[in-house]
Image: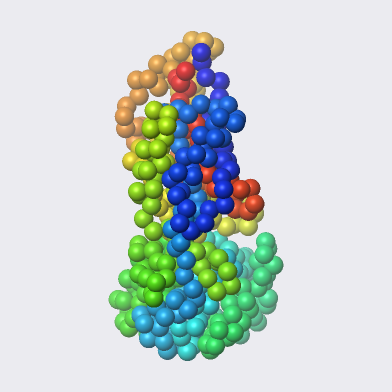
Amino acid sequence: MERRVGTVSRGIRCPIIREGDDLAKIVTESVLEAAAAEGFAIRNRDVIALTESIVARAQGNYASVDAIAADVRAKLGGGTIGVIFPILSRNRFAICLRGIAKGAKKIILMLSYPSDEVGNGLITLDQVDEAGINPFTDLLTLEQYRQLFGENKHPFTGVDYVQYYGDLIRECGAECEIIFANDCRRILEYTKDVLCCDIHSRQRTKRLLKAAGANRVCGMDDILNASIDGSGFNSKYGLLGSNKSTEDKIKLFPEDATDLVNAIQKNMIEATGKLVEVMVYGDGAFKDPVGKIWELADPVVSPAYTPGLEGTPNELKLKYLADNEFAGLSGEELKEAIKEKIKAKDDNLVGKMASEGTTPRRLTDLIGSLCDLTSGSGDKGTPIVYIQGYFDNYTAE
């Protein structure tokens, strides 16, 4: 019988995860129990996805602000430190900033403008234009910024992050000076010791600073990339991808979870005989049209996944075929012609006109974005997502 439904994404409830829990067992049982309760069958190439948060929780991958402070002090000297290009986030960065401030005597906080790296705006481009400012070259002091733009609160959170970050630094015992610039090298007019807090542009920022004569340069990925007195850590991403846990503790991005996704896949084969794909996901990669926020504050969408999720979609654009190659067909004849075209398609459609307009992104980024929207970030209680039909096409029976 012809399948009438394509991709289905289900949020799966599971127990609250604590440190030391057998996550592979819990995820497997939760999916099987949901399938039995809701009456859906497990099929080959279904996808099980689980949030990075429950993986890190099960791993116990936490660290205190004091551990951050100790690592910052050891790697950047503990004097005057330039902290550049942080995102504007109470959940993501403010807790890290507490530790950074405790590891320094003075912080030169350099904010990018008109917005941070992921789209949180301090001001608008229109305001920059009206002020006659060149955002590519001009550095503003805090006094100049206030004279030109006044107080600017985030449209969703209602927080003036300039004031908030400055107060936070001072509360932690460090002096604070705030400037605004988009050329990372301008920080060297204030200090030669720099912590780069950008996420996706961090390697370029570090390279430019070192070439321009910086003394000590670290990225967020260099802080807590090893344990400090027994703390959690992430050997690849350090503080990147971390979230606030308590007022003085962060949850780090999960350390290597490859064994976990492979174990879940193995459990499902043993329980059902079906080969499902498994991935860990964090932030999706999409942009909010109102707040202009690009969601991806994690260093990657998926830090671990089974090999079957490697690659990009290899799809034909049905409307292109219908409007061009098969423009003279309709009804059942059109349907069968398109099905035959799909069955005969090349294994690699890159550059082919019939695939133009299909989404040129990695499978893990696409599926991770779907999962992030499905699970939400609040109290839905569904940190596992079960996806069916993602790899189906128009010929699937």
In the foreground, 159 or 287 = 159
On the image, the x and y values in percent for residue 229 come to 39, 76
Quadrant position of residue 80: bottom left
In the foreground, 12 or 311 = 12
| Residue drawn 31% across the image and 76% down it | 210
Q: Is residue 262 visible?
A: yes
| Residue drawn 39% across the image and 59% down it | 255
Q: Answer with left or right where residue 3 lies relative to residue 229.
A: right
Q: Where is 353 relative to 280, above or below?
A: above
Q: Is residue 52 visible?
A: no
Q: Answer with left or right where residue 30 lies relative to residue 163.
A: left
On the image, the x and y values in percent for residue 129 come to 59, 69
Q: Where is 294 relative to 219, above or below?
A: above
Q: How are the residues colored?
A: rainbow
On the image, the x and y values in percent for residue 317 come to 46, 29
Q: Where is 311 relative to 171, above or below?
A: above
Q: As drawn, which residue projects farthest toward the top?
A: 333
On the image, the x and y values in percent for residue 27 come to 48, 43
Q: How many marks?
A: 0
| Residue drawn 39% across the image and 72% down it | 230
In the foreground, 52 or 138 = 52
In the foreground, 388 or 366 = 388
| Residue drawn 42% across the image and 32% down it | 271
Q: Where is 384 relative to 164, above or below?
A: above
Quadrant position of residue 169: bottom right
